[in-house]
Every structure is written in structure tokens, then in C-alpha cells.
Amino acid sequence: MCGRFAQLNGFSEIVMTAGARVPLEFLPRYNIAPSQKVPVVRRVTGFDVPVVDELLWGLIPFWAKSADIGGRLINARSESVTLKPAFRSAYKARRCLIPVDGFYEWKRDGVGGKCPYYIGMADKRPFALGGLWESWKGSDGSVVETFTVLTTEPNEIMKPIHKRMPLIIDHNNFNIWLDNEVCKTSAIDKLLSPYQAQDMQAIVVNSFVNNARNEGPGCIAPPEEDRQLSLF
């Protein structure tokens, strides 16, 4: 699955690569969690280029009777995305990119605990996760826009850590992923595979990141800094 990620200095680079408008202000975030608002890149009616909008993490299908379902739909399995009622409509016409510098996953340590890893590109460059977005209208007329992160089978970097990993969209395929007309072909389906492991790395980080309320560079600090961080 994908339940936490970071948007640091690489945000603008990904946005510009996608040909989108760059936000005037962006603050680095080290510990983004579900139910939070997150800037994503998408195409919307009325704009000639992709735009950046803040959407709530946890997809609420347009047909849902309650917004509560969003908490259970933070991820979508790419293998079944065309079959699940919650995702198939969005997959056809409402795909988005989530710019990240890295994501977190936890590996069981054999003694009942979990060890946090920060996973990203070996050269530290930013990248984009593949997502789906929806617009939901509540009974009071309010509109809530949400998104989910697609997941796929793990590559060789992820296999020792977790049985799933987020779908990563290569920068060469940004335009294809965001083009809502492309899904009429098999071009999109070909992108639903694990990213090449040789370009990635997984680094053990300290337990400071375990708490979703914690924020800042301490989230990606080495494990030996656990004690110092716990003092603040």
C-alpha cells in the first residue's frame, strides 16, 4: 500500500515537467498522511494545460451516499482498477499525478515492531505517483474533491519491505497519463507496472515518522537520531 509520503524541494520540478501551472507558494511537507489535503496535478475542463489543485487524500466515489468511504479508499489496486465500481470511472477520465520526493513503508522486524523506510530515487530526484480523482457532492450541496494512489506489485527494492508499492509514472509518460482520451487505447494499461528497481533506493529512517502528526526533516533522519528527536 501507500500510506505516507513527502513533498519536498522537487515539487515544482515535477509540476513543470507535466506542463502545469506552478503554484506561487509551496511549503515542504515531510509526513503527508491520508485525510489531508495534498496538491496534485490533473487536467480539468476549461484549461489548456494541467493544473495543480489541493485534493483530499481518500477517494469518495461520485455515487457514494456518505463521505465516510473515503477513509477506506486511500489506495486502489492497479490490477483491478477497471473492475471496481469505486475506481473504474475515474480511471477512464480522471487520472492525476502526485508529485513526491519519497514515500514511506514499514517492515516488520520479527519482534513485534516495525521499521520505517524512506523510499525514493537513488539520485534523489523527485518523481510522480499515479492517482485517480473524484468530485463528490454532499446532501448539503457542498463539493469535496478527493484522490487515491494506485498501487502495484513490488519491485526488487520493495519486495523485502512490503508486498505492494505505489504506482510510479515515468516523466516521459506524464502527458499520456493525464490525457483523458488515451484510455480508449491500451496505452494507459501498459503503465500499470512496477517501476524499475535499479533506479530506486530504500533507506531506514527513525521512528519519529511513525506518528503522522510529526513533521519536518526529522522524519527522514537516520535511526541513530531517535533519542535526540524524542527529547523535543
Image (cartoon, rainbow, N blue to C red):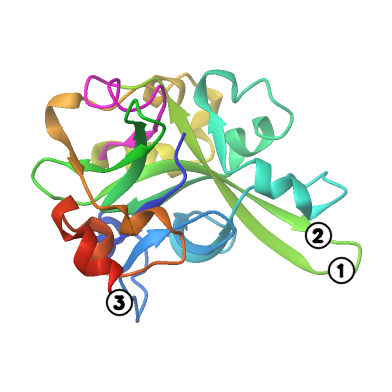
Residue 20 position, x and y percent, is 36, 61
Residue 26 position, x and y percent, is 34, 75
Disc 3 residue crowd, few under 14, some 14–19, many 20+, Cα 10 Å: few
In the picture of the structure, the residue carrying the numbered disc 1 is: 141
Question: Which residue ends up furthest to the left in the rendered image?
Answer: 123
Q: Amino acid at mark 2?
A: Lys
Identify the element where label 2 is drawn: strand
Which residue is nearer to you in this view: 203 or 39? 203
Residue 80 position, x and y percent, is 59, 20
Q: Amino acid at mark 3?
A: Phe
Kindly check if marks 3 and 1 are in contact, taking CB atoms under 8 A apart as contact. Answer: no
- What residue is drawn where x is 52% and y is 66%? 54
- Mark 3 or mark 2, which has the lower sequence index? 2
- Residue 157 highlighted magenta (yes or no): yes
Q: CA distance from mark 3 to mark 2?
A: 42 Å
Disc 2 residue crowd, few under 14, some 14–19, many 20+, Cα 10 Å: some
Q: Is residue 149 left or right of residue 9?
A: right
Comparing labels 3 and 2, the label whose residue is closer to the camera: 3
Residue 67 position, x and y percent, is 78, 54
Magenta-drawn stretch, dominant element (helix, strand or loop): loop
In the drawing, what numbered circle is on residue 157? none
Tell me the quarter of the picture where residue 170 sits: top left
- Mark 3 or mark 1, which has the lower sequence index? 1
